[in-house]
Amino acid sequence: MDVVLAEDHSLLRDGLTRVLEAHDFKVVEAVDNGPALTAALLAHRPDVAVVDIRLPPTFKDEGLRAAIEARRHIPALPILVLSQYVEQLYARELLGDRRGGVGYLLKDRVSNVGEFIEALRRVAAGGTAMDPEVVARLLGKQQNRLDALTPRELEVLGLMAEGRTNAAIAASLFVTEKAVGKHSANVFRKLGLGQSEDDNRRVLAVLAYLEGN
């Protein structure tokens, strides 16, 4: 599986490259700035991109802007953001695209290599992988829209937004999948969203709706 990696810290870039290659990924190019990232994505059209947000030359949002620009030329390009920061504006734009896999993980909370690799594979396959803190920031801005949800429905929504399947949610909450399905239906009904059998599209729709309306 081909990967383009964008990280300006050389030690972390080299470390991530070694971890990825040890798990059967092929890092076709590793770059340290925004313009080089755009060029690499368009040249290689990888299976997935791992992108830091703040890259040279200005260390603001070059990484994410480069990835979003590349998606305009490569629709549904899977992107996993790996950053120290929660950039809500660009998270909304990335999630609102609703095409291809997407993930947003915080560096200081990624402590398990296995979980990182599993999240990357999920994104590459078209799924989602969201850090709970990122989810909390996005949902927190629209707390008034969540007042109609019960505590259990809020738990289910948060886990869905992380990219978990109904089976995984059921296991986490120690309930049946049927119960999760019922709570999910209530969440969508109360938020005015249509139901979908596509878990990834459903999660993206919820996050985009909560953040963008």
Image (cartoon, rainbow, N blue to C red):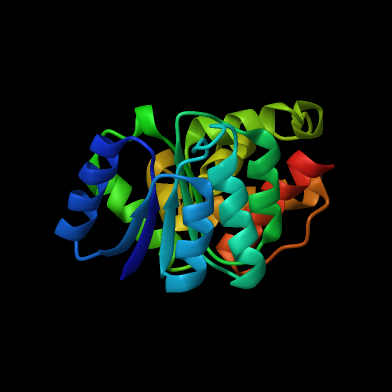
Please give the name of the residue rendered at 62% of the width and 29% of the height, measured from the top-left corner.
137
Q: Is residue 171 visible?
A: yes
Kindly indicate the quadrant of the structure image that contains residue 201: bottom right
Relative image position of residue 67 (x, y in whole percent): 56, 55
Query: Which quarter of the image is occupied by the N terminus?
Result: bottom left
Who is closer to the viewer here, 203 or 50? 50
**From what the image shows, is residue 211 above or below residue 199?**
above
Residue 173: name its quadrant: top left
Residue displayed at 25% across by 64% down: 25
Depth check: give the residue in front, 210 or 1: 1
Q: Nearer the viewer, residue 102 or 34?
A: 34
Q: Residue 40 placed where, x, y %?
A: 45, 63
Q: Is residue 124 left or right of residue 195?
A: left
Residue 147 position in % (x across, y down): 77, 28
Res. 128 in view: no
Depicted 161 relative to depicted 74: above or below:
above
Q: Residue at x 58, y 69 (%)?
A: 76
For this view, does 128 lie left or right of residue 16?
Answer: right
Quarter containing the C terminus: top right
